[in-house]
Image: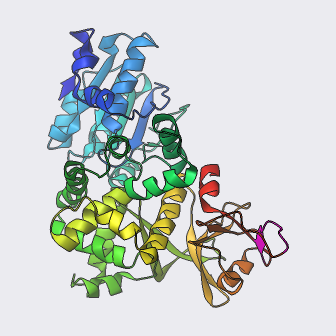
């Protein structure tokens, strides 16, 4: 439960399971910056993304670079606690220290333990970093801790998410023979941005079934912890794959997978959003600059390899290492997967986005709080003027084209617009995000 192995050995990091695995990987993600200011701070992100490893890297930094005494640093795995009382009894003796609590949402009513700790005045001199793999559970319960959040942080409510394409391309450029951005993107479509996935990409041609199984277990395990059916979770993931980039509704999905009422589907989708598996895009309402809740929605996957694990399992009853590769080779599927990557990249940048309709067509992404890039339309190849007519509703919007060959007109001039709408290389724009 409590770990302070650094008090017993100066070589503790060599035997620490998280750091051993980290250093054994071909790709090592850089540590996030840390300011150990008093308060309660959160590190959010999906399971297996490296939150526990980040805690251990921070502990190394505190011990070496910042010269903080080992007695003032505590690591605690909360998954072994059943309720808040056990958690509180464990943290109560510690103050004037830096306390790392991993998977804090595991004990029931966990926030009560931190509230009592704060009400006793200990939080004024204690820095507490907490992690959780379900963003909804952590944020919703954390709202009961008003005025007890960290102040003056470099990172506040930090998220550790899969690598962006820009980060992935940098890794490919540094660790492999010279790779063009397009070559990197083709790999990114298959492998996504989990650090372990990136390491496998560097070492192997195909993803191992062991890693796919870990990703599958993470999502289905989260459903089980929330008292939901793993079988229905997998079936829902398959249905979202079938409808990827298309508008649909909770009611339509419930009918397709025989899940009962649409509120049940909404609950499942909220769980998958909370554990960083799905992204939801609502229809844009220009009056409120928000979403229209009762309209159809579009769903995307945050990471392609998690999608791979869920959908191949749902379709075949087993994990097929080549499933996603096969999908990418189909032109009709590749365009959907590319749009999914764009949605994922926007989410990683914390851009708020929706979809919209105009002039009888659909606009893939509307970004109401990005005045220089208010809308994006994703195309596999160069579109015609009629195909992008809806974009005229957003004069500063852009069409991002994947198969971009520096197109020229009949007069030999480089094409940068179709009509009045800017067109550009999708890969280049993702590197610029």
Question: In the picture provided, is 347 more to the left or to the right than 236?
Answer: right
x, y percent for residue 24: 29, 29
Closest to the observer: 395 or 93?
Answer: 395
What residue is shown at x 31% (from left), y 35% (from top)?
52
* Whether residue 64 can be seen here: yes
Residue 417 covered by magenta stretch: yes
Q: Nearer the viewer, residue 295 or 247?
A: 247
Residue at image location 27% in from the left, 41% down from the top: 103
Residue sitting at the far bottom: 360
Is 247 situated left or right of 403 in this image? Answer: left
Q: Is residue 66 above or below residue 246?
A: above
Residue at screen point 22% across, 28% down: 17
The quadrant in which residue 385 appears is bottom right
In the image, is 372 to the left or to the right of 110?
Answer: right
Residue 134 picture location, percent across and down? 32, 52
Q: Mark yes or no: residue 232 visible.
A: no
- Quadrant of the snapshot with the N terminus: top left
Towards the viewer: 188 or 123? 188
Extent of the magenta region: 411-418
**Main secondary structure along the magenta-highlighted residues:** loop
- Comparing 74 with 428, the one in front is 428
Percent position (x, y) of residue 220? Answer: 20, 60
User: Does 34 appear in magenta?
Assistant: no
Image: 23 above or below 305 = above
How has the structure been colored for display?
rainbow
The x and y percentages for residue 66 are 46, 13
- The relative height of residue 20 versus residue 282 in the rendered view (above or below) is above
Label tally? 0
Q: Is residue 297 left or right of residue 272?
A: right
Give the image quarter of residue 68. Answer: top left
Q: Is residue 194 above or below residue 380?
A: above
Q: Residue at x 21, y 35 (%)?
A: 87
């Amino acid at each position: 439960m409590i770990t302070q192995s650094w008090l017993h050995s100066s070589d503790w990091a060599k035997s620490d399971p998280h750091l051993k695995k980290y250093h054994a990987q071909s790709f090592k993600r850089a540590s996030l910056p840390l300011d150990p200011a008093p308060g309660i701070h959160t590190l959010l992100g999906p399971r297996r993304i490296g939150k526990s490893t980040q805690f251990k890297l921070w502990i190394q930094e505190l011990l070496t670079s910042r010269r903080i005494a080992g007695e003032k640093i505590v690591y605690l795995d909360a998954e072994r606690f059943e309720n808040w009382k056990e958690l509180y009894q464990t943290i109560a003796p510690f103050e004037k220290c830096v306390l790392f609590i991993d998977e804090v949402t595991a004990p029931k009513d966990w926030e009560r333990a931190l509230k009592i700790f704060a009400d006793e005045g200990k939080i004024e001199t204690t820095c507490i970093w907490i992690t959780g793999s379900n963003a909804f559970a952590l944020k919703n319960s954390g709202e009961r801790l008003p005025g007890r959040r960290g102040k003056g942080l470099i990172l506040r409510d930090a998220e550790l998410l899969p690598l962006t394409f820009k980060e992935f391309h940098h890794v490919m450029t540094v660790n492999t023979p010279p790779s063009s951005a397009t070559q990197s993107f083709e790999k990114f479509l298959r492998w996504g941005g989990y650090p372990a996935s990136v390491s496998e990409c560097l070492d192997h041609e195909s993803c191992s079934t062991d890693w796919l199984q870990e990703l599958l277990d993470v999502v289905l395990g989260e459903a089980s912890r929330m008292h939901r059916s793993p079988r229905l979770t997998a079936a829902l993931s398959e249905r979202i794959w079938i409808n990827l980039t298309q508008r649909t509704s909770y009611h339509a999905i419930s009918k397709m997978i025989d899940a009962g009422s649409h509120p049940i589907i909404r609950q499942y989708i909220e769980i998958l959003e909370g554990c960083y598996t799905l992204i939801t895009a609502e229809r844009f309402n220009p009056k409120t600059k928000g979403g229209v809740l009762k309209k159809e929605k579009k769903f995307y996957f945050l990471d392609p390899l998690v999608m791979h694990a869920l959908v191949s399992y749902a379709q075949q009853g087993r994990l097929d290492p080549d499933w996603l590769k096969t999908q990418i080779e189909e032109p009709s599927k590749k365009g959907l997967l590319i749009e999914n990557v764009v949605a994922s990249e926007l989410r990683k940048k914390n851009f708020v986005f929706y979809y919209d309709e105009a002039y009888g067509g659909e606009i893939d992404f509307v970004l109401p709080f990005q005045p220089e890039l208010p809308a994006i339309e994703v195309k596999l190849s160069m579109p015609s003027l009629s195909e992008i007519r809806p974009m005229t509703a957003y004069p500063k919007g852009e069409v991002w084209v994947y198969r971009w060959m520096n197109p020229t007109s009949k007069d030999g001039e480089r094409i940068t617009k179709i009509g009045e709408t800017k067109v550009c290389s999708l890969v280049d724009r993702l590197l610029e995000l």
